[in-house]
Image (tube, helix red, strand yellow):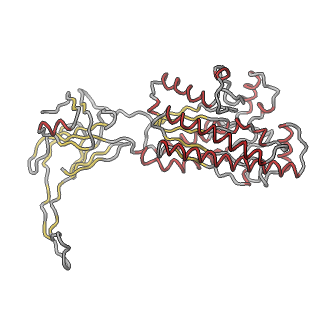
Amino acid sequence: MTLNRRSFIRDASAFAAAGAGCLTFGGVGQLFAGPGVLRLSDRPFNMLAFGDSIMWGQGLAENQKFATLVRDWMKTNLLGRPVTFVNFAHSGARVWPDTVQDALAPLPGEVPAKFPSIHRQLHSALDTLTARNIRPSEIDLVLLNGGINDIGVASILSPFASSGGVRDLTRDTISTRMNHLLPLAASLFSNAKFIVPGYFPIVTEDSATPEVTALLGVLGGVLFTPLVKQQLIANCSAFYTEADAGLRAAVTAQNGRTPNRCVFADPGFSMYNGYGASQRFLFNTGESDPMVVSRKDSCGAAGMGLDVLCTSASMGHPNVNGAVKYANAMTAKLGGFLLEWQALRKLFACIEPKPVTGVTANYTVWVEDASTRVPVAATVTVGTKTVAANRSFSHGFACTPGKPVIALGALPPGRTATLPESCEQVVITAPGYIPLGVPY
């Protein structure tokens, strides 16, 4: 059996069966070396995001959003591999679907709207992927959050609600919603890793009284008192604690179904980072933000131009510093997947003819992607020589004979005082691939 530039090798085991003079290693694959220049074919790293206004990045310019910062971090750490990213999240999105509302045309992302639901966002992504000729199985990373709008921010920030009631509502809602959403997303994007960021306590002990007063005025004109502030603090703490527990539990449950695919990231806001706090990570009421002008225009076009909950929708959402905090928490968790992503692809190689020690001959190291079966423009190192894969080169393979060594003391049973024979290694490297090296 002879391999040439027009040959397909469909199964490495066929070589052994036929006694072929081609040394294969790295897995079983199909090699094709067509005429002309061989090119490295490498699909991009594909990312998607789904969720509510937190995931959308309410009030922030595109380059300031934590989802974008995570994308940029991936670009930096994926060794030059292209990264694609689409954020389907939008302000106000609920998890639970609604057949009628989900069928309506979506509003701009800065305009608070319950629908399309996050459930619908997942299915909208399938349509987008089809249009872009990307298979759902080619999605590598999904950023996913949701649940606070199913509870209702007003329910959390109501001084008439009890912290116990907020706790029960959050426990029931977050757990139910994410335990529905995460398995659905994992089934749609079957090879993706998932990161689920948590929420944060909104009003805290360090929240300034004037800012809390302004917030209450927007939400319903409730008169501020110290007792009201303490109730809001208790409610926000109850929401944060139960949301955190519910999201963590959903991630753990999903990893039980599909191991090592999901992580939870707590943004880690302290009491000093809450709404109106001394080191706040959230926009204040009435504070200008990068999107305020365009958002007011969008609110007006949607018939919500006089609704301060639309025109000032950034209040209570992560500001630039808050987005950085979120991104850092998420990338710290994603770092555990980096080695897998950096070496996501494996090589398959075949040396033709099979090397013979002491004989100088023309050899070719055929290299392909073990999964896609596409030739890879790899670098081959043989001893001290560096050559290109998939091209013929002349070489005389050599081995260093074994030699005796001086043994100090008695040797363990079965051990000899002789170094074994050492032969040159063939090492194959290519950007984004696991290096492949074997002694012949």
Residue 251, x across and y down, in percent:
56, 45
* Extreme residue toward the left, this view: 359
* Extreme residue toward the bottom, this view: 409
Q: Nearer the viewer, residue 53 or 396?
A: 53
Please give left or right for residue 151 compared with residue 83 in the image: right
Q: Quadrant of residue 44?
A: top left
Q: Quadrant of residue 108?
A: top right
Residue at x 82%, y 43% (from the top left corner): 161
Compared with residue 104, is residue 365 higher up or lower down, i.e. above or below? Answer: below
Q: Quadrant of residue 393?
A: top left
Q: Report the number of numbered marks.
A: 0
Residue 319 visible somewhere in the drawing: no
Residue 255 visible somewhere in the drawing: yes
Residue at x 25%, y 30% (from the top left corner): 32
Please give left or right for residue 175 compared with residue 436 in the image: right
Residue 340, x across and y down, in percent:
42, 46
Q: Nearer the viewer, residue 171 or 219?
A: 171
Quadrant in which the N terminus is drawn = top left
Residue 270, x across and y down, in percent:
70, 54
Residue at x 61%, y 42% (from the top left corner): 66
Residue at x 49%, y 26% (from the top left corner): 129
Residue 331, x across and y down, in percent:
54, 47
Please give left or right for residue 130 compared with residue 244 in the image: left
